[in-house]
Amino acid sequence: MSDSGSAENAPPAPGDAAAAQAHERVPVPPRAGADGAGAGESPTPPVAEGGDGARQAAPPAEAGAAEAGSGAAGGGSTPDEPSAEPYRVSVRDLGRFAVAAVTVVAALAGLILGIRSELYAGREDQRAKKAEQRAVDEQQRANEAREKAYADLVDFYRMGSQVIVVNGSSRVMAMRLTLPGSHVRWDLDLLQPCKQISIANRSMLDSMAAEEPSVKLVEEDLAQLRLEFMDPLNRAWIRNSGGAVARTAGWQPSGRPFMVSSESWNSTAQDAPACGKT
C-alpha cells in the first residue's frame, strides 16, 4: 500500500472536518446588479454553527430589535418626519382680522347713526307739532280778538255808590243791566257812541220802582249787577263789574234801541276816555 492511497483513504481529523464545514458555510457576497443595488451593503459576517458563535451573534440583532421596539413604543419621530413648529401669524390672518374689525365698527356706527336719526326725526316731529299747535292757537286768538273787537270797547264797573257804563265804540249797541238773583232786567235803551254814563244806586232804585212797583230792591242787591250788550254783529256779551268779557246767550233788545230814555244819567252822559273807530 502506497502512502498516497493511505492518505486519501484515511479518515479526516476532527479539526480538519470543522474547518471544512466552516469553509463551506462562508456566504459569498452578492454581486452588484446592473442598477447598483446592493453595492453599498456590507457582507454579512459568517456565523459559526457552534453554540458560542450563535450566542455571540444574537445580541446585535436583539439590540437592534429592542431599539426598533423602543422607538415604536415611545412614539418618537422617524428621521423623515418633520418636527412640529409654533404657529406664526401671517399677513393674510392680519388682513382678515382687520376686515372683521372694520365690519364690526361700521355696523356699530350705522346703528348709532340710525338711532340718532330716529331721535332727530322724533324731535323734528315734536317741533313741527308744537309749531302747528302754536299756529292754531295764534289763529284762534286772532279770531277771538276780531270777535271781541266791539266787546272790548264796552266797560262796566262799580265805583262807590255809582255804576259806570262805557261805550267806547263808534257804533250803537243795545245794553241792559241784570240782577240774576232777583231775575230783574233793566234796559238802558240807548247809550250813545263814545259816551259813558254814571248811574247812582238811589236813582236806579227809584227808576225801577216807578217802572215796576212790584219789584222791591235795596242798594245791597245792586252788588250783583252785571251788564249785557249786543254788538253790531248781533253777538251777545256779558261783563261783570270790573271783570272780563265773555259770550252769553242772545236776547231780544227793547223795541226802542235808538231812543234815548229820559233818565237823568242819559241826559248827563260824558265823553268816553277812548273812542275806537270800530
Image: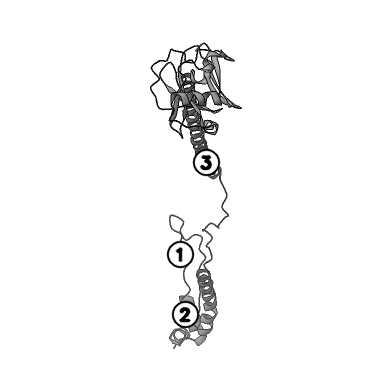
> Which mark is drawn over residue 144?
none
How many numbered marks, from 0 up? 3
Name the residue that disc number 1 marks: 30
Residue at x 51%, y 25% (from the top left corner) = 206
Which residue is under mark 3? 108
Q: Residues within 10 Å of mark 1 (few under 14, many from 20)?
A: few
Q: x, y (%) of residue 229?
A: 46, 22
- Which is nearer the N-term, disc 1 or disc 2? 2
Q: Is residue 271 visible?
A: no
Earlier in the chain: of badge 2 and badge 3, it is 2
Please state which of the two labelled residues, at mark 1 or mark 2, is closer to the viewer: 1
Q: Are marks 1 and 2 in contact (CB under 8 Å)?
A: no
Estimate the x, y position of residue 190 in percent, counting from the top left.
47, 15
Q: Nearer the viewer, residue 103 or 72?
A: 103
Q: Mark 2, residues whose alpha carbon is within 10 Å: few (<14), some, or many (≥20)?
A: few
> What amino acid type is highlighted by mark number 3?
Leu
Q: Position of residue 44 (x, y in %)?
A: 50, 70
Calculate the distance from the C-alpha at mark 2 to the C-alpha at mark 3: 95 Å
Amino acid type, callout 2: Gln
Q: Which residue is mark 2?
A: 21
The answer to whether residue 209 is seen in the rendering is yes
| Kind of element beneath mark 1 | loop
Q: Kindly check if marks 3 and 1 are in contact, taking CB atoms under 8 A apart as contact.
A: no
Query: Which numbered mark, 3 or 1, is in the foreground of this view?
Result: 3
Please name the residue shown 46% across and 76% down the image: 25
Helix, strand or loop at disc 2? helix
In 3D space, how far apart are the residues under numbered discs 1 and 2 (Cα atoms)?
21 Å
104 or 41, which lies in front? 104
